[in-house]
Amino acid sequence: MPGSCPCGHGTWAAPANRREALALARHHDEIAHLLTVVARDSGRRLGVLRCTRCRRLWAEDSMTSGHADMFFIYPIDATDPEDWPARARPLNPPPG
């Protein structure tokens, strides 16, 4: 059933703005113990993580506050998670 895993994959979406990205950064901190790395493109600061319980995928992205970089996650359904970072574009959430 969607939303039944503690990772909350079924209850989140890609952020539309920085406020939502900040909420997803906090969510990442809360569920980090459930996530394992599938793939990363360190040069572009994108990655794919997998929940160890429900096996669903999360994108890892980053944004800068002007003082520090912050990583956030959002749920994805990728058919090739190992290749996803190479094909994806950073979201760069707008202010809001």
Image (cartoon, rainbow, N blue to C red):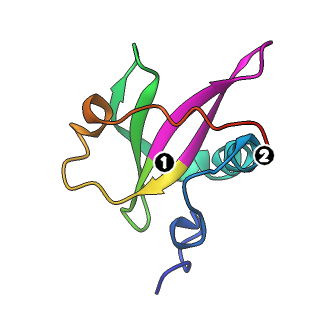
- Magenta segment main secondary structure: strand
Q: Is residue 54 left or right of residue 85?
A: right
Instruction: Inspect the magenta stretch and tell me whether residue 62 lies in it.
Output: yes
Circle 2 SS class: helix
Q: Quadrant of residue 87?
A: top left
Where residue 16 appears, as percent x and y from the top left, is 63, 51
The structure residue drawn at horizontal position 62% and vertical position 50%, both measured from the top left corner, is 15
Which residue ends up furthest to the bottom in the rendered image? 1
Q: Residues within 10 Å of mark 1 (few under 14, many from 20)?
A: some
What number is the disc on residue 35? Answer: 1
**Pointer 2: what residue?**
19
Where residue 19 appears, as percent x and y from the top left, is 78, 46
The structure residue drawn at horizontal position 57% and vertical position 63%, both measured from the top left corner, is 7
Q: Is residue 36 left or right of residue 10?
A: left
Where residue 49 appears, as percent x and y from the top left, is 41, 44
Q: First in sequence: mark 1 or mark 2?
A: 2
Instruction: Inspect the magenta stretch and tell me whether residue 38 lies in it.
Output: no
Magenta extent = 59-73
Q: Residues within 10 Å of mark 2 (few under 14, many from 20)?
A: some
Q: Quadrant of residue 76?
A: bottom left
**Residue type at tag 2:** Arg
The image quadrant where one finds the C terminus is top right
Front-lying residue, 62 or 26: 62
Circle 1 SS class: strand
Where residue 73 appears, as percent x and y from the top left, is 56, 45
Q: Is residue 94 left or right of residue 13?
A: right
Q: Nearer the viewer, mark 1 or mark 2?
A: 2
Is the Cβ of the residue at disc 1 closer than 8 Å to that at disc 2?
no
What number is the disc on residue 83? Answer: none
